[in-house]
Amino acid sequence: MPYTDRHGIEMKQFPVWIPMQLYHLVKADHLNVSRFVREQLEILYSDESLEDSLNTKFRLVRGARESCDRQREVAAEASANRERLRDVVRRMRDDRIASTTAAEQKVTGIRDALISIVGEDLTGRYRRMLPENDPNGDRIDMWEDLVRRVSRACGHEVESAEVAGELRRMAAEV
C-alpha cells in the first residue's frame, strides 16, 4: 500500500548517505533531512522563477551560516565550561593540599609540645595518664592539665583525643 502525505501526494522512501561530520551537524541543529532533500529536489525539477530560486538559496545559505554560528557558540561554551571545571579541580587540589599541610603542622605542633612537656618520661606517669590506662579516672585532672598545657604550647585549642593519639604514637616509637 503506497504512503501518501497530508496533501494526498504519494511518497517514496529511499536512503541517503552523508558524511558522519555532516550527520552530527544536522543532528545538532535538529534539521529535518527528509524535508530538506525533498525541497532541494523540488527546486531542481520545478519551473519556479529565478527570483524564487535565489530566495530559496539565500534562505539555505542563511540557515547554514546560522548553523555554523550556533556550532561555534556551542564550542565556545564547551571550552569555557572545561576551563571552569579545570579551575574547580585546581582549587579543590589546593584546598586538599592546604588542609593536609595544616593537619601535619598541627600534629607536629602537638608532638613538639609533648616533647617539651613530657621529655623522656613516656613510659612513666604520662603513659599511665592515657584514658585507656586510667579506667577509674584517678588521673583525669592531671590529663586535663596536660591537654591545657599542650594547647597553650601550641597556641590554639587542642582536643584531648589528639593529645592522646600523639602520646600513643610517641610511646610506641620508644
Image (cartoon, grey):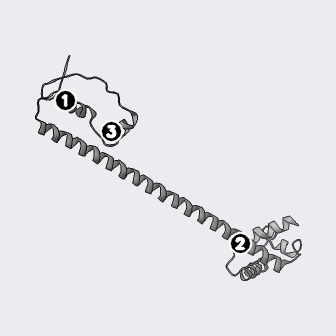
Say the numbered circle drawn on residue 44.
1
Q: Nearer the viewer, residue 163 or 60?
A: 60
Circle 3: residue type: Val
Q: Which residue is mark 2?
A: 105
Asked whether 36 or 89 is in front, the reply is 36
Kindly identify the residue that appears in the image at 80 percent across and 76 percent down. 114
Mark 2 residue type? Gln
Image height of 107 relative to 2, above or below? below
The kind of residue on which mark 1 rests is: Leu
- SS for tag 1? helix
Residue 45 lies left or right of residue 116; in this view the side is left
Q: Earlier in the sequence, mark 3 or mark 2?
A: 3
Q: Which residue is mark 3?
A: 26
Does the rendering let one see residue 138? no
Residue at the image point whose x is 67% and y is 80% from the top: 156
Quarter of the picture containing the N terminus is top left
Q: Pointer 3 and pointer 2: residues touching (CB < 8 Å)?
A: no
Tell me the crowding category of disc 1: few under 14, some 14 to 19, or many 20 or more residues within 10 angstroms, Cα based: few
x, y percent for residue 6:
14, 29
Q: Nearer the viewer, mark 3 or mark 1?
A: 1
For marks 1 and 2, give the one nearer the viewer.
1
Q: Position of residue 58 (x, y in %)?
A: 20, 43
Q: Residues within 10 Å of mark 2 (few under 14, many from 20)?
A: few
